[in-house]
Image (cartoon, grey):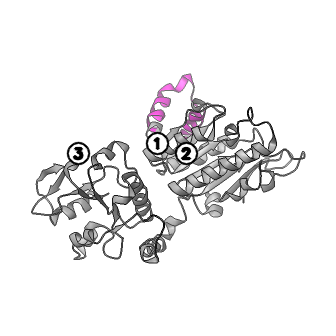
Amino acid sequence: MEIVCLIQRWMGQDIYKVKNLESLSEVVVVADIRDFMALASVGIQNAVCLPYGVKVLSQNLLPYFESCEKVVLWLGSSYGSLSASVRYAKKLTERRCYLVRPNSGRESAAKALAAGEDPRRIVLEAKPIWHRFVTTFESLRADVTAEILNISEITGIAWSRFPMLNTILKGHRRGEVSVLTGPTGCGKTTFLSEYSLDLALQGVNTLWGSFEIKNSRLARTMLQQYSGMSFNTHNLDLFNIWADKFENLPIYFLTFHGQHSIKTVMGAVEHCAYTYDIGHVIIDNIQFMIDIGREDNYSNRFWIQDLILQTFRKFATANNCHVTLVIHPRKEADGSNLTINSVFGSAKATQEADNIMIMQNRAKMPQRKYLQVN
């Protein structure tokens, strides 16, 4: 990878190659070409503008940073930018990463230059991201300020297809765990398909783990929900048009089917989270990670389920990724509504969850199926 920068003038000037990124010991990383030009205009020749901004740091770019001893991240002041800074620092190794705190007037290199600030001095004042166990309010102050200034983003990404969920859950937030339960055949997977599609359409990188339904069937359901059409042999031309569009959505599928251990599944999930900057993981359902053939009593099954929930909770927090888990309910008396206590397993199943959704299926009611959110 080669770095290029502008010389002499701010606009309309030729661009020339400076040097290979691999030869630099220190780089300044920005997410917008305007910030790149602002840094170049003051003589900073080791700036890098990421091709996908704060959306994703592609794995094929990582080798170019291997020789860098210091990486300064100046990605912006929005909540999404700060979140990306944390994710990228983990990919690039936190010990060598520094962050430009987005104080007033230095939200970005371009804004800092326009406000009369010296970007070179700001880069020199960048603070280390990593500290093994300790932090202070001084380190948190800018982050707290950013959360206050971006409160609308802190509330989460709003669903466009499920407006009532926005009223109750205040949007989809990274780092949380949601649990969905409901009787067999009530439409949990169909709901989750559109629930996750809605977010993927808004740029949330999504990983689907469907252990019961084949990926081809799930993808077909999502494609039909995306297009609002049912495809058959008579409209294959339309299928190809919509399929081309669907391919561009940031949706990935695990290839597991049937029972697999939590260790095997988490290995794949963590790899995808690292490689594709996944923001939403759906597991349908965790019962397929409880090896019933080997554990023949309920106490062991409960223990394994608790371990699975604890593992996903830790993953969600450590990777700032939302995890949605499907858990089967216990058998209830006919005609009874499901409750939080109906979720299969110990109390940990609901204690670890930030949001609990219950798909109710009441044949004798006017609204036969509805979603209850706790």
Q: Earlier in the sequence, mark 1 or mark 3?
A: 3
Determine the residue positioned at 48% across, 66% down.
133
Report the predominant secondary structure element of the magenta stretch. helix
Residue contact at pointers 3 and 2, CB within 8 angstroms: no
Helix, strand or loop at label 2? It is helix
Outermost residue on the front side: it is 132
Are the two marked residues, 2 and 1, in contact with CB atoms closer than 8 angstroms? Answer: yes
Question: At label 1, which amino acid type do we have?
Answer: Leu
Secondary structure under badge 3? loop
Query: How crowded is the residue under tag 3: few (<14 C-alpha within 10 Å), some, or many (20+)?
Result: few
> Picture coordinates of residue 330 (x, y %)?
82, 46
The image shows residue 99 at horizontal and vertical percentages of 35, 65
Observer-side mark, 1 or 3, equals: 3
Q: Which residue is mark 1?
A: 249
* Residue range (magenta): 218-245
- Residue beneath disc 3: 1
